[in-house]
């Protein structure tokens, strides 16, 4: 025999002739809410129903109870006749009971969740149907008689037609306190069936169990374990966070619990964003000390969240550009927040202003970089960044936590950039009668003995071929230009196969005079402009200022213009190894004549285009044709210089037109500063040695015959 729960009290009611039934009254006052939730779950204790003898009289008068009055029923092997008599007395109707009715009933109701008087009718229907007792109404008299077993599967509040089954010895009615009927059926079905049966009353959350007394005892022990108060038997602890967000701690703590307890851990973490806390629910008897340790680790200390000044020395970029990139993100985020602020309607009174707080740094929403996946960076970083150009550093004012997250993005941006070695040949070809309309570069590529590839839209000139070697490869280029000159104008030619530039120029020189104007090699950083100028800075008269009164000369405006060869190239390396280049090339010189106002004229050939080419491949730009008139004077020496006579008698002048075509060949080569570039350096030194030998052979800058003795400095005579 078990005892009533400690939180239920027995209320003494007037005695009635019928068998007595104790009624437990629940406490009406609610307990005070917990200020700090911190408890270890208790294991449920095994309980059984209160046993009453067959001859124990019921000591309560149900008729004096209101419809909503709590009623506690604890029956143990009580005769059905006594139950019918007591319930009919409570509901106020007259009964006639068949003497053959002798079934016994067991029932229990929890003290903290009792039944009500209006619930007695459906319970009576359930017990009568299970015991095979029918009820007929004749006038104001209800007749109860034994007709045979009829076991119900489901009972509603109103009388329903029930299915028949073999009548068990005992029917137990059990109201469920904390679990649902579906959960109870899933747990009890393997224990009760097939020897017993389970009935359900969903509207009251009540189950009826038909089984032997021995099986009911096991069922009651099982119900005592599963139908337990979760607020008592589950461990709970509320962790208030000081420095982190509840959602962030919940995500990290879930990962830790899954790694320790598997994909379905018995611990549950609930984030409470409004109070910035997390609630951890644990199984009965589980200790939360380890969980508390992890929360302390994840929730950083207070000194780690205060704003500090950090200095990041930029290694590969300009600090002002990096700061501007991040600041643009701040401006975008701040503008979005200003747009989201509610605007005050017309005529609406302005609310009193709150005391202004110190300005907070803007929040940052860092972009997702291509190829790096999602960054583990919060979208609510509060940072303020200023660039120091003198030391090329970033001054960052933020908390240590936000600074560590911001560094992930800065490291991805501050990478060592690649470089491009741009090898260029600028040549001028003097056209002959056979090539007076320009050189057919496509036909030349098709018949060049060093390049037997087919004509197409591909050109392959590895960088090694720039110095006379032969390899193979493929590239694709795309060009555009706004310059046209000559008959065929500006053209860009491509060919497949390998191309030896030296052999190409020698082949052109066999039928035309060719002059190498410049052959530079310049190393430039990715996405930066490389410029080169070979020539002079010529002054020219750009304007004449005269007086408006007497038209007299006041002053002349003189400006300077770069003449010669100018080349500007901006390479941009893509991820697939192709190089996009912006090319600007100009060859200019003083013109042969002057304008009507005696101003200097200039001639120029200019190319401005954008191309895409693979690494170690080349493009050839040609078709810029210029025509110059040249006067060739012939005559008898000395006599042709006689004034007034020699020019007309002893000399003659022939006019000749000279047509030249400008050729530009560019070979870009990607250089990784972190790799070993010994091959490129050695190749460049070999080229310089070839140039030195060539100059020595031409006696331009002879180096042979010179002594190795150091040259003494020249001593100037003292001035008087």
Image (cartoon, helix red, strand yellow):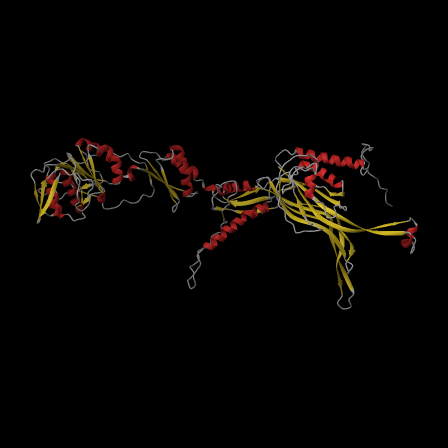
The quarter holding residue 127 reads: top left
Most distant residue in the top direction: 214
Along the line of sight, which residue is nearer the eye, 289 or 220? 220
> How far across and down, in percent of the image, does residue 646 sit?
91, 53
- Residue shown at the point (56%, 45%) measured from the top left: 395
Residue 16 position by quadrant: top left
Residue 189: tell me if it is visible.
yes
Left or right, residue 604 beside residue 164: right
Q: Position of residue 352 (x, y in %)?
A: 43, 59
Q: Compare residues 364 and 624 and report the one nearer the observer.
A: 624
706 vs 308, nearest the viewer = 706
Displayed quadrant of residue 349: bottom left
Which quarter of the rendering shows the N terminus? top left
- Residue closer to the observer: 539 or 573: 573
Q: Is residue 218 left or right of residue 641?
A: left
In the rendered view, tell whether residue 177 sits above or below residue 482: above
Relative to residue 17, is residue 513 drawn left or right? right
Vertical order, 388 against 257 (above or below):
below
Residue at coordinates 45% horizontally, 55% vertically from top-left? 341
The image position of residue 607, as x and y in percent, is: 68, 49
């Amino acid at each position: 025999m078990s005892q009533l729960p400690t939180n239920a009290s027995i209320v003494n009611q007037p005695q009635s002739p019928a068998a007595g039934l104790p009624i437990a009254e629940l406490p009406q006052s609610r307990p005070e809410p917990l200020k700090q939730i911190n408890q270890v779950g208790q294991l449920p204790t095994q309980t059984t129903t209160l046993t009453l003898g067959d001859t124990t009289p019921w000591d309560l008068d149900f008729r004096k109870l209101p419809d909503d009055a709590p009623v506690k029923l604890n029956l143990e092997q009580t005769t059905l006749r006594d139950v019918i008599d007591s319930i009919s007395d409570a509901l106020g109707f007259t009964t006639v009971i068949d003497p053959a009715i002798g079934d016994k009933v067991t029932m229990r109701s929890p003290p903290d969740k009792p039944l009500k008087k209006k619930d007695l009718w459906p319970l009576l229907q359930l017990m009568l149907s299970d015991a095979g007792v029918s009820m007929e109404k004749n006038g104001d008299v209800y007749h109860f008689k034994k007709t045979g077993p009829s076991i119900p599967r489901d009972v509603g509040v109103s009388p329903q037609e029930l299915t028949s089954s073999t009548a068990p010895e005992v029917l137990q009615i059990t109201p469920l306190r904390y679990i649902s009927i579906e959960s109870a059926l899933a747990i009890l079905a393997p224990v009760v069936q097939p020897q017993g049966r389970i009935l359900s009353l969903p509207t009251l959350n009540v189950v009826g169990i038909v089984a032997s007394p021995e099986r009911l005892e096991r069922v009651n022990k099982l119900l005592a374990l599963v139908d337990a108060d979760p607020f008592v038997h589950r461990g709970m602890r509320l962790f208030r966070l000081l420095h982190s967000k509840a959602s962030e701690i919940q995500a990290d703590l879930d990962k830790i619990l899954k790694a320790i307890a598997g994909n379905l851990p018995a611990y549950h973490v609930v984030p409470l964003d409004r109070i910035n806390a997390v609630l951890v629910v644990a199984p009965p008897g589980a200790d939360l000390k380890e969980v508390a340790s992890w929360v302390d680790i994840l929730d950083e200390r207070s000194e780690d969240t205060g704003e500090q000044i950090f200095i990041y020395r930029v290694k590969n970029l300009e600090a002002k550009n990096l700061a501007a990139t991040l600041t643009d993100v701040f401006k975008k985020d701040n503008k979005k927040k200003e747009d989201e602020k509610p605007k005050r309607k017309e005529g609406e009174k302005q609310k009193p202003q709150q005391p202004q707080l110190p300005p907070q740094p803007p929040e940052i929403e860092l972009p997702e970089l291509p190829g790096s996946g999602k960054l583990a960076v919060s979208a609510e970083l509060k940072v303020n960044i200023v660039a120091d150009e003198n030391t090329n550093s970033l001054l960052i004012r933020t908390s240590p936590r936000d600074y560590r997250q911001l560094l992930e993005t800065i490291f991805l941006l501050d990478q060592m950039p690649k470089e491009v070695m741009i090898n260029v040949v600028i040549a001028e070809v003097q056209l002959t009668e056979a090539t007076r309309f320009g050189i057919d570069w496509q036909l030349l590529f098709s018949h060049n003995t060093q390049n037997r590839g087919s004509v197409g839209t591909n050109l392959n000139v590895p960088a090694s071929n720039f110095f006379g070697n032969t390899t193979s490869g493929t590239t694709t280029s795309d060009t555009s230009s706004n310059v046209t000159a000559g008959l065929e104008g500006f053209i860009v030619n491509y060919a497949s196969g390998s191309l030896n530039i030296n052999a190409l120029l020698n082949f052109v020189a066999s039928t035309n005079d060719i002059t190498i104007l410049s052959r530079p090699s310049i190393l430039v950083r990715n996405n930066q402009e490389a410029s080169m100028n070979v020539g002079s800075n010529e002054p020219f008269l750009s304007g004449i200022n005269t007086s408006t009164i007497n038209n007299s000369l006041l002053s002349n405006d003189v400006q300077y213009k770069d003449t010669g060869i100018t080349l500007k190239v901006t390479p941009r390396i893509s991820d697939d190894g192709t190089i996009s280049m912006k090319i600007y090339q100009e060859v200019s010189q003083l013109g042969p004549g002057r304008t009507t106002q005696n101003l200097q004229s200039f001639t120029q050939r200019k190319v401005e285009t954008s191309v895409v080419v693979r690494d170690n491949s080349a493009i050839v730009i040609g078709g810029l044709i210029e025509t110059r008139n040249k006067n060739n004077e012939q005559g008898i020496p000395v006599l042709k210089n006689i004034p007034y006579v020699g020019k007309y008698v002893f000399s003659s002048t022939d006019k000749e037109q000279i047509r030249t075509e400008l050729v530009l060949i560019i070979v870009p080569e990607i250089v990784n500063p972190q790799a070993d570039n010994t091959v490129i350096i050695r190749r460049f030194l070999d080229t310089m040695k070839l140039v030195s030998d060539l100059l020595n052979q031409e006696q331009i800058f002879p180096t042979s015959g010179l002594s190795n003795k150091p040259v003494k400095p020249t001593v100037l005579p003292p001035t008087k």
